[in-house]
Amino acid sequence: MALTEMGAKELADLIAQGGVSAEEAVMATLERIQQTEPCLQALLTVCPEQAISHARELDRSGTSETRGPLAGVPVIVKDNICTAGIKTTCASRMLADWVPPYSATVVERLQQAGGIVVAKSNLDEFAMGSSTENSAFGPSRNPWNVACVPGGSSGGSASAVAARQAPLALGSDTGGSIRQPAALCGIVGLKPTYGRVSRYGLVAYASSLDQIGPMARSVRDVALLFQVIAGGDRKDSTCVSMPASDYEAACIADVRGLRIGVPREYFASGVQAEVASAVRTAVDTLSDLGAIAEECSMPSTSWSLAAYYIIAPAEASSNLARYDGVKYGFRAHAAGRGHIGMAERTRAEGFGREVKQRIMVGTYALSAGYYEAYYKRAQQVRTLIRRDFERVFERYDVLITPTSPTVAFRLGERAEDPLAMKLADTCTLPANMAGVPAISVPCGFHDGLPIGLQIMAKPFDEVTLLRAAYTYEQATDWWRRSPEL
């Protein structure tokens, strides 16, 4: 078997046993990137020199017991997560040449575990989008059909993992940006409970919603990376200081007695019939394995999209105010226009259309006379959404829904229809609004494109989430399929 076809756990074990060196694993990854990248455009920066240097250093030092659980495993990092000495652009002209002086906590942890950063992946600019078409450097493509989008905003990470460019990737999820592209590319993506993983070093979009998470081709590999990056961090005041569970050990194929809720609101109009059918078949599969499933209701779900697109832009308008051309990043030439003129022109030229739209919406929602009518009311709706989850989790252990209402759509298909684009996240937004963990796993195909199954669990109960996902994965073979590029 080719090294690039191996999962992270399998490759790490082979390196630990001396069957292959870390350098060989990295070289195979770089070769695969060179082969596939011209048609996918999944990556923004490839760092072969640093990756090979780290691999050689790893091969020379320590024993398999001291190298860490990811020793020698190549990892791709979404380009809104800071990496010391490697460009972090957020797929924006505003940060096109910015090299951070420090690494995010998650990057430090994966490197301490022996993981090797080989590249930074493409995304929608500042993580604002659902297709990766908003990148200032061009869209990424879906390896199952290069005429289609890979989803967003972590579309580059999802495309790269599905195409076997690397066995692991890090993404960020504000309203579905890990799970939706994972579904559209046929891989596994986990959004942890808000506060379970440090956000230090993640370039902020909407701080009360953002969360970093792992992406891989299997549930076990997702659990492996999650084990490494989870845990408290003094550098992030929102990160909960509770020890990480043994997430790898949670990957047990046993759902006997597991109580599953299937919220009817997630199967409303807009969900493709084939997607709904595949998800319901997956519920039947888990029921046959001993789980107890029944339909339930979460009425506040229908309001989540509207509330999200008030709260997230409001936080974005505040977070992105720092990009004024003064301290770092892009600065426009505005001779004779003074500081204010320079800042105005910098923001006009440095931000893309979608980012500017969201900044304006957010600024309006926070302005005098409109704050209570929009932002305050959206936060009240968010409370209702969270209470819906609290109520159903009194009866059920997990909830199962579609991840995306449709399979991947064609590039440019929704470019002039912003509502249709935003509806791509209707099934994933509520988990961010409530802060609960959620995972997407492959559960079928339609027109040759993958379908994703979303499983949600109680806050900080990723153990149950991973057990349910792993059980379903092992009972099917959807996750074993790979695209032919």
Image: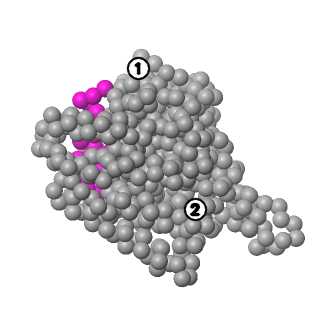
Q: How many labels does the image show?
A: 2
Q: Residue furthest right?
A: 336
Q: How far separated are the C-alphas under marks 2 and 1?
A: 50 Å
**Mark 1 or mark 2, which is nearer the start of the sequence?**
1
Q: Going 78% across and 67% down the picture, which residue do you hit?
A: 342
Q: Going 64% across and 61% down the picture, which residue do you hit?
A: 356
From this view, report whether residue 93 is shown above or below residue 140: below
Q: Is residue 213 left or right of residue 255?
A: right
Whether residue 349 can be seen here = yes
Q: What residue type is labelled 2?
A: Arg
Residue located beneath label 1 in the image: 19
Q: Going 27% across and 63% down the picture, which residue do you hit?
A: 388
Q: Going 69% across and 52% down the picture, which residue do you hit?
A: 93
Q: Residue furthest front?
A: 269
Q: Position of residue 418 (x, y in %)?
A: 55, 53
Q: Position of residue 52 (x, y in %)?
A: 57, 31
Q: Give the range drawn in magenta.
A: 454-477
Q: In which quarter of the image is residue 282?
A: top left
From this view, report whether residue 153 is shown above or below residue 298: above
Q: What residue type is labelled 1?
A: Gly
- Residue 400: which numbered mark, if any? none
Residue located beneath label 2 in the image: 358
Q: Residue furthest top?
A: 1
Q: Is residue 461 magenta?
A: yes
Q: In which quarter of the image is residue 64?
A: top left
Mark 1, residues whose alpha carbon is within 10 Å: few (<14), some, or many (≥20)? few
Q: Is residue 71 left or right of residue 49?
A: left
Kind of element beneath mark 1 = loop
